[in-house]
Image (spheres, rainbow, N blue to C red):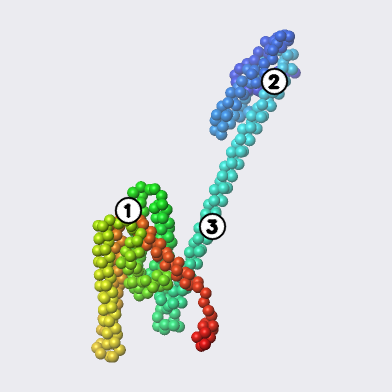
Amino acid sequence: MPDEPVVVNSSEEVVDTDEQSVNMSSPSTQFAPARRMGIFEPFHHMSMWEDTFRGDIIPSAGACMVTLPNDRADDKSGYTSSEQLIPSGSEDNQAGKSISDKVQRRLAQNREAARKSRMRKKAYVQQLEKSNLKLAQLEMELERARQQGLYIFGSNCNPGLSSTINPGIAAFEMEYSLWVEEQQKKNAELRNILQSHVSEMELQLLVETVLNHYYNLFRMKTDAAKADVFYLMSGVWRTSVERFFLWLGGFKPSELINVVMPQLEPLTDQQIVQICNLRHCCQQAEDALTQGMDKLQQTLAQNILTMTTGMGSYSSQMVSSMEKLEALESFVNQADHLRQQTLQQMSLILTTRQAAWGLLAFGEYLQRLRALSSLWAARPREPPSLLCQNRCR
């Protein structure tokens, strides 16, 4: 039978079978464990390196080879056969272990990718649901405005008028709906940060953010006044209870001071004097704007009366009335400017923490007005037929 090399390891170590056969025939020969024999040492080191660099280096079983010399064919027949079987099994186990580790890593990666994909899908679905809810709310608000006939005019009810939506007002309603949602979030942030121990710098940044949020509302109202000042002054974009307190398209600045004052204690004597002076100035400005509005109404009524009695040129009187109506936009803008100046002056008079408490008090005040409006709209009502019967009795 021809001698063939036996594949056992990638090491260059050559084992002398003559010396091994002599030692094996001696009765005092002690057999070392297989894992400590020279030909198996590379496997031992390979296992150690594999544990260290697992995932980066995977040894190939086909590259491990040692050629044994062919000096004693009679002794080699039994020796090499047993030696061949042992490393061959270890090699298979090592290769199988490497493949198994690789498969496990890929399975883990696939599971992680699937988990992230499910999370992205869930977030996308939630975003769609939230967008659908906002869209439904906007559609309800637009339908309510359409029924009230504030800025959507039907050809049947108002002949000669266009049945189109004012794009400026539609954009304002969408922006204001988002503004209210953002204000609720900022109220929650103020409440949380005031209950925790934060630095003065963090609190100051939040106060400035809330103030800028109100300034943004005034900017939105300026654009809406250019589109339709009557819509803005009617307050249909606010809830029913908020409209009850409406003054020139918004809240009275002196009302703001009255709402937040109880939440600002303790105040120094100087702060009390400054706040009282500010409230007095606000009331004077409010009275001046109110008187200007009354004067505008009287003048406009006289012009209309002149047109109906036929005195003067109809076209010139109509132009004069239009010019006076344009002054209405200026009144609304001046009122918003007074509101913004009041917020700025209050933030300068108060400390940072007092300003935060004041903004929180005013924000919660507006939230309570909206909540009261919702309760009022959802109150139980008697059918019209029962109302007529009760009145007849």
Give the amino acid type for the residue marked by disc 2 in the picture.
Glu
Q: Which mark is residue 352?
A: 1
Indicate which disc, 2 or 3, sits on the residue closer to the N terminus. 2
Could you say whether the residue bearing mark 2 is in a helix, strand or loop?
helix
**Could you classify mark 1 by the number of other residues whose Cα lies within 10 Å: few (under 14), some (14-19), or many (20 or more)?**
some
**Alpha carbon separation for disc pair 1 and 3:** 41 Å
Q: Are marks 1 and 3 in contact (CB under 8 Å)?
A: no
Give the image location of residue 201, x and y in percent: 33, 49
Could you say whether the residue bearing mark 1 is in a helix, strand or loop?
helix
Q: Which residue is mark 3?
A: 125
Q: Relative to residue 365, is residue 393 drawn left or right?
A: right
- Residue closest to the eye, 100 or 296: 296
Q: Which one is closest to the eye, mark 1 or mark 3?
A: 1
Q: Relative to residue 160, is residue 69 drawn left or right?
A: right
Examine the rendering and report whether any part of residue 385 can be seen.
yes
Q: Relative to residue 87, is residue 346 drawn left or right?
A: left
Give the amino acid type for the residue marked by disc 3 in the picture.
Val
Q: Which one is closest to the eye, mark 2 or mark 3?
A: 3
Give the image location of residue 334, x and y in percent: 28, 69
Q: Which residue is mark 2?
A: 83
Give the amino acid type for the residue marked by disc 1 in the picture.
Thr
Up/down of 389 relative to 17, above or below:
below
**Residue 240 in which image quadrant:** bottom left
